[in-house]
């Protein structure tokens, strides 16, 4: 399959700031991702807990969950060749210190405020991308997209 899907989120710190929201959206376009689906929503705390359950028990889990439920977020299904790795590169490192010093032009390097308020999320594997896409877009069928849409988009 030529195209891969990933889930990208713009977190509450960035959605709340119109210029940052626009800049992140532009990064998606300028890196030639195809926007397959997009929605904005306010998450409940329970949804955040479930989404980040792999981090349950870590010292940052509580503040992460509170933050993600603190305001609207924007979710995208993005398609690209090697979309998962490409989006993570465009985002930059998780930790704000590393982002600012190692990848200052990345999204997190440009707009990250703290290790928690780090602007964006991206899936980290094919398995987690499927799980995360289903969490945000329950009506979306990956299988159908690959059968009916992806073949027409490939070049
Ligand atoms: O996948 P990614 O978002 O780059 O990092 P993860 O290690 O999966 O952590 C998820 C999420 O948790 C991160 O985006 C912010 C938050 N977090 C934190 O608040 N403090 C840390 N020291 C590490 C992660
Ligand atoms: Mg992660």
Image (cartoon, rainbow, N blue to C red):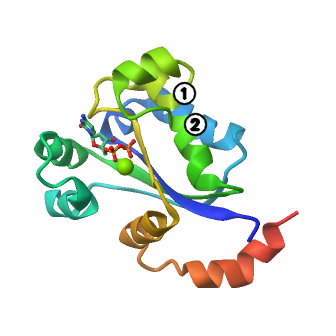
- Residue drawn at x 15%, y 55% as measured from the top left: 56
| Few, some or many residues within 10 Å of mark 1 (<14, 14–19, 20+) | many
Viewer-proximal residue, 78 or 52? 52
- Residue drawn at x 54%, y 27% as measured from the top left: 106
Mark 1 sits near ligand 1, with its Cβ under 8 Å away: no
The picture places residue 27, in percent across and down from the top left corner, at: 61, 36
Residue 90 numbered tag? 2
- Residue at the limit of the structure toward the top, as seen here: 101
- Quadrant of image for the C terminus: bottom right
- Residue drawn at x 50%, y 30% as measured from the top left: 107
Q: Quadrant of residue 96?
A: top left
> Is 115 on the left or on the right of 35, as rendered?
left
Say if mark 1 contacts mark 2, CB within 8 Å.
Answer: yes
- Residue drawn at x 31%, y 47% as measured from the top left: 72
Q: Which residue is mark 1?
A: 106
SS for callout 2: helix
| Few, some or many residues within 10 Å of mark 2 (<14, 14–19, 20+) | some
């Amino acid at each position: 399959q030529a195209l891969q899907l990933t889930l990208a989120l713009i977190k509450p710190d960035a959605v709340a700031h119109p210029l940052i929201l626009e800049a992140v959206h532009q990064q998606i376009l300028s890196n030639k991702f195809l926007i397959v689906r997009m929605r904005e929503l306010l998450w409940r705390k329970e949804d955040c807990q479930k989404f980040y359950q792999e981090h349950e028990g870590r010292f940052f889990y509580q503040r992460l969950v509170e933050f993600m439920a603190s305001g609207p977020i924007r979710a995208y299904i993005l398609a690209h060749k090697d979309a998962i790795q490409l989006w993570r590169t465009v985002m930059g490192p998780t930790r704000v210190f590393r982002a600012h010093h190692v990848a200052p032009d990345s999204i997190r390097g440009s707009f990250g405020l703290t290790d928690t308020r780090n602007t964006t999320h991206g899936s980290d594997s094919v398995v987690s991308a499927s799980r995360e896409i289903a969490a945000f877009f329950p009506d979306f069928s990956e299988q159908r997209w690959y059968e009916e849409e992806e073949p027409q988009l490939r070049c």
